[in-house]
Image (cartoon, rainbow, N blue to C red):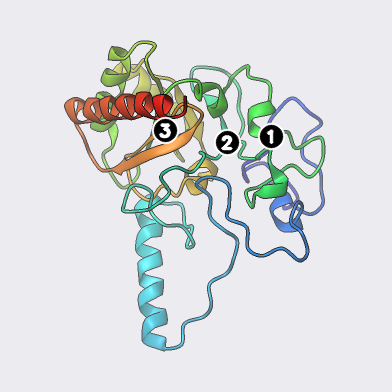
Amino acid sequence: MSPDSDQGRGGWWPGGEGPRKGPRPDDSGAGKGEDSGPVRPRGLATPGTPKPAGRYPLFVGLAFVAILVIALLNLLGDDNAGILGAGTSDEGLPLAEFAVVDVAGTSDADANVYQDDCEGSQNPCPEDQQRVPACAIEPEGAIRVCDLFDKPLAISFWFTRGGDCTPTQDAFDSVASRYGDRANFLSVNVRDDRETVTDIVRERGWQVPVGLDPDGAVSNLYLVGGCPTIVLAYPGGILYRAVLGSYDAGEIGGFVDELLTASRERAASDR
């Protein structure tokens, strides 16, 4: 991969002329006023503000160890991220947009995490017409999360390295099959190769849509820090809650029932 390539950084998608050289959208400051204060990122994203250096060597050492543990846990290495589902207070925020390759299709690309609200976001944004926002790409061969915002939504992030997440994915798939058209479900694999994921899906007979996040761009965007992490969202793509850990079908079904009830109550209160 050449140093100037954007493939692998989350935002390249086949079908155009390909990535262009030049400043990356997340480095350009596009859409931010020169005199404006800090902007809270759209949805579940990590602000680009660097942390100040520690004052004491011991503190620096402990902080480094903590960051290393998190990085090893999820194999993503984002030292600014919190851990979604572990006591974070992001409930009520809009989910960041993304598009991933459908493992059942034939497309081959990294996840697209470019947003469509550059003026009010610190998430990556297109810098030109060749950088199409995630929810504006051609849908063939892709899963666009925005297309799932019409109903309550459950997204399960999982990977095979460093943990056994497949039993919870079995349960997630089982729950998805029971809820019919009452909710949408999406399984997102992080950093495993396509052949591995395809074999797992086939062997375990999953029917839930499975998207590929080969470079971890979506997982970083959503602050995923463990496997599995399940994100639950109201219709419209607003975060209801997230849970981290291994669960059986009864427990996951309970989470979805709570989401459906909360969604009805939310809709009634908005009338």
On the image, the x and y values in percent for residue 98 come to 57, 35
On the image, the x and y values in percent for residue 186 come to 42, 26
Residue 233 numbered tag: 3
The residue indicated by pointer 1 is: 133
- Which residue lies at the image location 44% right of the left edge and 42% below the top edge? 92
Q: Secondary structure at mark 1?
A: loop
Q: From the viewer's perspective, is 8 left or right of 28? A: left
The image quarter in which residue 29 lies: bottom right
Mark 2 is on which residue type?
Glu
Observer-nearest residue: 26 or 190? Answer: 26
Residue most extreme to the bottom: 56
On the image, the x and y values in percent for residue 262 come to 33, 30
> Which is in the foreground here, disc 3 or disc 2?
3
What's the distance in space between the residues labelled 3 and 2, CA to CA?
Answer: 13 Å
Q: From the viewer's perspective, is 41 left or right of 90? A: right
- Which residue lies at the image location 31% right of the left edge and 21% below the top edge? 173
The residue indicated by pointer 2 is: 97
- Which residue lies at the image location 22% right of the left edge and 28% below the top edge? 254
Q: Callout 3: 10 Å neighbours few (<14), some, many (20+)?
A: many
Q: From the viewer's perspective, is 246 left or right of 125? A: left
Mark 3 is on which residue type?
Ala
3 or 1: tag closer to the N-terminus: 1
Observer-nearest residue: 166 or 2? Answer: 166
3 or 2: tag closer to the N-terminus: 2
Q: Would you say residue 215 is visible in this rendering? A: no
| CB under 8 Å between discs 1 and 2 | yes
| CB under 8 Å between discs 3 and 2 | no
Q: From the viewer's perspective, is 120 left or right of 106? A: right
